[in-house]
Amino acid sequence: MARRRRRFTREFKVQVLNEITAGKTIAQAAREHNIHETLICKWRKDYEKDPEAAFPGNGNPTSAEAKIAELERMVGRLTMENDLLKKALERSGQTKK
């Protein structure tokens, strides 16, 4: 099954770059938007070269399905962390039963 490439709008790319300029790390922005760090670096390089001509093509904003999948992964990870911490507390005798 062939995977389709995602396309991002110019506004989305500029928004991500503005977040980084405001102090967010590239890694944080990449995780939040479910994109690879090198892609953000490429966008930044293109934007710094010529802000007006950067990102001329048409794109589609990220889908809601991708955001839902990311949130589901986060819930799963947090559930596993929670279970691990509960077991650690039980073993140390800190919980009240």
Image (spheres, rainbow, N blue to C red):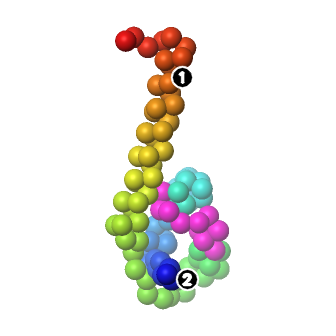
Assign a secondary structure to mark 1: helix
Residue at mark 2: 54
Magenta-tinted stretch: 32-42
Residue 76 seen anywhere in this rendered image of the structure: yes
Which one is nearer the viewer's eye here, 78 or 2? 2
- Specify whether residue 33 is painted magenta: yes
**Looking at the rendering, which quadrant does residue 25 occupy?**
bottom right
Q: Who's the residue at 41% across and 66% down the image?
A: 66
Q: Who's the residue at 50% across and 19% down the image?
A: 89
Residue at mark 1: 88
- Specify whether residue 34 is painted magenta: yes
Q: Is residue 49 left or right of residue 60?
A: right
Amino acid on which disc 1 is placed: Ala
Amino acid on which disc 2 is placed: Ala
85 to 64, vertically: above or below: above
Which residue occupies the extreme front position in the image?
Answer: 1
Q: Which is nearer the N-term, disc 2 or disc 1?
A: 2
**Residue 38: % across, % down:** 65, 68
Badge 2 vs badge 1, beta-carbon distance below 8 Å? no
